Image (cartoon, helix red, strand yellow):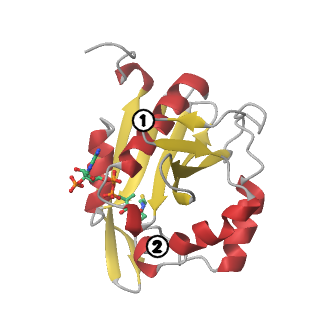
Amino acid sequence: MNATVFSEPLKTDRLVLRLFAENDLDDMYAYQGLPEVARYLYRPPRDRARCAEVIGRIGQGTHWKEDGDSLTLAVCRHDTPGVIGEVMVSLSSAYAGQAEIGWVFHPDHGGRGYATEAALALRDLAFQQLSVHRLFARIDADNTASVRICERLSMRREAHLIENDRDDRGWGSEYVYAILAREIEPAGTD
Ligand SMILES: CC(C)(COP(=O)(O)OP(=O)(O)OC[C@H]1O[C@@H](n2cnc3c(N)ncnc32)[C@H](O)[C@@H]1OP(=O)(O)O)[C@@H](O)C(=O)NCCC(=O)NCCS
């Protein structure tokens, strides 16, 4: 996949998902710079320079062909300007059609279902347009908000890895959630 393949913004009831642009830097930094947002991301918060670097890379769109290729979309509300968060999918195995999904949102826009709505749209895009066979998520077991998103995406908890990670807070455990393409009901079914 490349930028021309993802040419049209993806619209949902309340949101638009599109590629990042240079002038989204302030909006991205507003959430990616927050320690509470990075808490479960397996990496530190991003500073402004790092956000600019990331936008330079992901804003170009992406190839969707080889292991490691990925697509990150900025999420905007219809009713207010600016980027409120992002959803991403990355190809872990091109041969086996395995892809990982993730989401990061500004806490100011939390608790209204925006992350779930955007993740559902990306889940469907992954299956319908990116030929993904199995979509999975790796979630810190303490990240209950993300666990709830996985469940709203009809993903199944396939693994609970006990103390498979460690950081300055101590040991961390992880859930693996997943769903197969054939488990998604075709649009229009009850
Ligand atoms: C994970 C994260 C995106 C979840 O945010 P969130 O606000 O809980 O998720 P949503 O936007 O989907 O909102 C869901 C909540 O809105 C509620 N809601 C309110 N109005 C709603 C509506 N119109 N439609 C749907 N849900 C609505 C839901 O009931 C739900 O509440 P609940 O979780 O108490 O059941 C956010 O916490 C985050 O960005 N965290 C930091 C990054 C991170 O950890 N990412 C995951 C790494 S794997």
Query: What is the distance, in whole Å, between disc 1 and disc 2 at their CAs?
Result: 28 Å
Query: What crowding class fits label 1: few (fewer than 14 Cα within 10 Å), some (14-19), or many (20 or more)?
Result: few
Tell me which numbered mark, 1 or 2, is placed earlier along the sequence.
1
The quarter of the displayed image where residue 154 is located: top left
Residue displayed at 54% across by 23% down: 128
Determine which of the numbered discs, if any, sits on residue 13 in the image: 1
Q: Is mark 2 within 8 Å of ligand 1?
A: yes
Type of amino acid at the residue the image marks with label 2: Ala
**Image: 130 above or below 118:** above
- Decide if residue 156 is in sight here: no
Front residue (pair 131, 50): 50
Q: What is the quadrant of the C terminus in the image?
A: top left
Front residue (pair 34, 147): 34
Residue displayed at 39% across by 17% down: 187
Q: Secondary structure at mark 2?
A: helix
Horizontal side, residue 163 vs residue 8: left or right? left
Type of amino acid at the residue the image marks with label 1: Asp
Q: Residue furthest bottom?
A: 168
Say which residue label 2 marks. Answer: 38
Q: Secondary structure at mark 1?
A: loop
